[in-house]
Structures are given as C-alpha cells and as structure tokens.
Image: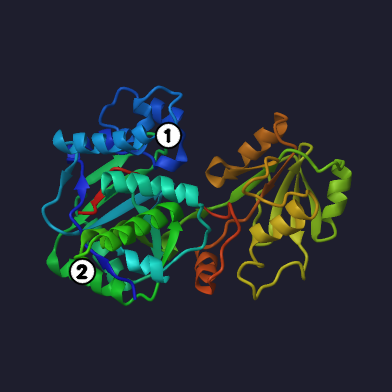
Amino acid sequence: MAKVKPFKGIRPPKELVEKIESRPYDVLNSEEARAEAGDNEMSLYHIIKPEIDFTPDTSEYDPRVYEKAAENFQKFQDKGWLKQDTKEQYYIYAQTMNGKTQYGLVVGAFVDDYLNGVIKKHELTRRDKEEDRMKHVRVNNANIEPVFFAYPDNDVLDAIICKYKATEPEYDFIAPIDGFRHQLWIVSDDNDIKTVTDEFEKMPYLYIADGHHRSAAAALVGAEKAKQNPNHTGTEEYNYFMAVCFQASQLTILDYNRVVKDLNGMTSEEFLNALTTNFTVEDKGTEIYKPAKLHEFSLYLDSHWYSLTAKDGTYDNNDPIGVLDVDISSRLILDNILGIKDLRSDKRIDFVGGLRGLGELKRRVDNGEMTMALALYPVSMQQIMDIADSGKIMPPKATWFEPKLRSGLIIHKLA
C-alpha cells in the first residue's frame, strides 16, 4: 500500500512567486533558460539551470555548476526569497489548460515504495540522466522540483480538494510561457492531513506519469542516505521525496508525433504501396487530418495527408504493449519499412509534442527539413496503468503530458 507524508515545504512568499517560478529543468536548454531568466536574480533557473551563471560555453555537467546550484539555493533562503513552512502539511496544486483544470496533491512519497514497485514505472531510465539529477539532489540536500504521479480516482480525496478549491488560493497566476493558470492551496487542517495519509494508504499502487529520471534520482539518493546513516530509523525526511499526485481521470495526455528525414531509398509511391500490406491507406487531401481513434494514423507526405488504419491481425488486443499505436507504428512503419530500429538514437527521426499541433509537422516537412510526418492518436492513462501493472515498459517517446508542472512553488528538504 502507498505511504505518503506531509512535509514542511520551502516556498516563495506570495508576492514573489511569479518572480521565482519557472518551467521544469528538462523542457528547455541552457540558452533558453538564460534568456528566460534575463536579469531576474530570483528566477529558479539559477538553481535548476545554474550554468546560466557561467559563460555560455560552460557544460551544465561541470562540477562548478552543481556547486553553484547549492550556493544559489542557500542564497534564496538567506534573502527570504524562499521560506520554510513551520508545519508539516500537504498542498493542492491546480493547473488549468484550455478551460480544463486538474488538481494534484503535493505529498512526500516513500522511497521504499519506489524501490519495491508500489510506485510503478512505465518507462526506462538512462543512468547518465539519473546521475545528473542525483548530483543535483545531493548537493542541495533537497528535491527542488517535484515528480508527477497519478492515482486511481478517490471520492474522499476529491471531497477534500473540493473543500479547499472553494477557498482563496495561496498562489494564483498565469505562467508567461505556457499561458496556463497555476494555483496552490495549503492543507493545514490536522483532520484533513490524516485523511489524505489514510486514503493513500488504501491504494495498492501509485503511477509515475512524468518525471521518471527525477523519481529514480530522488529515490536512489534517499536509499543512499539510509545506507550511510548508522542510526537510520526509517523516519528521516530523506526517506521521502516530493511528488504531485493527480487523479488519473483528470490527466491530459497529448499525441507524441514523429517526423522522418527520408524514405529509406524509396519513392513516395513505393512507400505508400509498402504501407498497404498492414494498413488501409486513404488520401485525405491537402487539409490537415488528425487521427480520430486508436489504430488510425495520419501521414503527411508530398503536401498530402493520408489516413492509415491498421488492419486486423497487426496488433494484439491482449498485449498491453502490442496494442499501442506507438508500438504498431514503430514495428510496421519505422522499423519494417524505413529501417529505423532505435528511436532513442537514430538521427533520421525526431519527435514533436502534441501541444505544437499538426501544423508543426506540416511546417517541418514543407520546409525540406523532413520528408514525412506521422501523427498518432494519444495514449490513454488507462493504457499506461495497464502497462505499469503488467510490469512491462512502454516504447520510447510514447507520452506527452500537458500542462507541465511549474517548478519553484514548493521545495522539499531532505533534512
């Protein structure tokens, strides 16, 4: 069963939150972070992308960069830009995108739950990325940014959220880059805190939606600290890491689409003919065509849009991986026809998050950068949970969650 606890969050005073908050470290590069921070010395990028405080040729993995992160984190606290709450409590974080709001509970998630599989994963992690985030957690002795979990819908927790969302939030702002609304409430009532803890304890599993590398790094550092402490009891703060947990039914997963540089030596006619072995191919004309259902794909090639519908027998409804459109397209189009074997390393393919729209696919083909584009129907949260429950791993580049969590609203110290 899932174990969570309240914690004393470190966060900005209300009047400073919009100065400090930022996008997550992994959705922008160093140059973009430097531009967004500008002359704002309170920007969280000075902690999560501290290479911006060095010359542009400085590697983000330079040891001095990690040291700078810790120096800046301490500076933010010394100057009162970040202050620690005096009580252990939970928080409610709401995001509104295109008129739809999702509400998450900010909790301390249990390290052992991650290590023992109570917190379920659906993606592989890379050791180099894990080690980067582990260094960041170690040097700051804190989880500066949260991870993004999903939990099965729960009426009791929903009632608590409804109670607080009817009150004035602690934070309420529109983010400058994504244009989405972000709100935060503090759950400080002792009875509500106990109810949240008890309800999570009834859940057999939690699911990582986004932030697999941050989750791994946070849990591994916690386990590391436990081994290094001869007086370890299991109650120390490092046994927990910060997560925002959303009800699964509220989450929005967008399509994650592909653009490809060439047709593996084939003409367009040969490529379209090869597709007919496993797909019903229909020319949809020159207007943008979006897939309307599972197992239907949109292809953009030579200024035309095509629908590709996977034929019966090309997927297995009883296999949580084999039924995925990302698996069907990877096997039957990218691998079999185009010779793209490894989505993680092949330079002939790139990926476009659904927030950019299919117009971005068209643009990248029309300008000659790419030869064709493939749009997929979005994966569902139920599919992700089914895969995690089966112990299998999703193919790479399968999910794109929006909106992204803003960083800097709450930080969790490990001591």
The percent coordinates of residue 404 (x first, y second) are 42, 47
Numbered disc 1: secondary structure = loop
Cα distance, mark 1 to mark 2? 36 Å
Which residue: 76% across, 36% down? 303
State whether residue 409 appears in this view.
Answer: no
Q: What residue did someone put label 2 on?
A: 233
Mark 2 crowd level (few <14, some 14–19, many ≥20, 10 Å Cα): few
**Percent of width and height locating residue 161:** 27, 62
- Which residue is label 1 attached to? 60
Which quarter of the picture shows residue 395?
bottom right
Q: Residue at x 58, y 51 (%)?
A: 397
Within the image, what quadrant is residue 153 found in?
A: bottom left
Q: Is residue 128 left or right of residue 87?
A: right
**Is the residue marked by circle 1 packed among few (<14), some (14-19), or many (20+) residues within 10 Å?**
some
In this orientation, does residue 314 appear? yes
Task: Please tell me which residue is depicted at 30% across the width and 39% down the height of the picture.
Answer: 21
On residue 190, which mark appears?
none
Residue 269: give x, y in percent of width and height. Answer: 88, 44
For the residue pair 366 and 34, the one nearer the viewer reads as 34
Please, what is the three-letter code of the amino acid marked with disc 2?
A: Thr
Q: Which amino acid does the dot numbered 1 rest on?
A: Glu
Q: Quadrant of residue 193?
A: bottom left
Frontmost of labels 1 and 2 is 2
Residue 179 screen position, x and y as percent = 40, 38
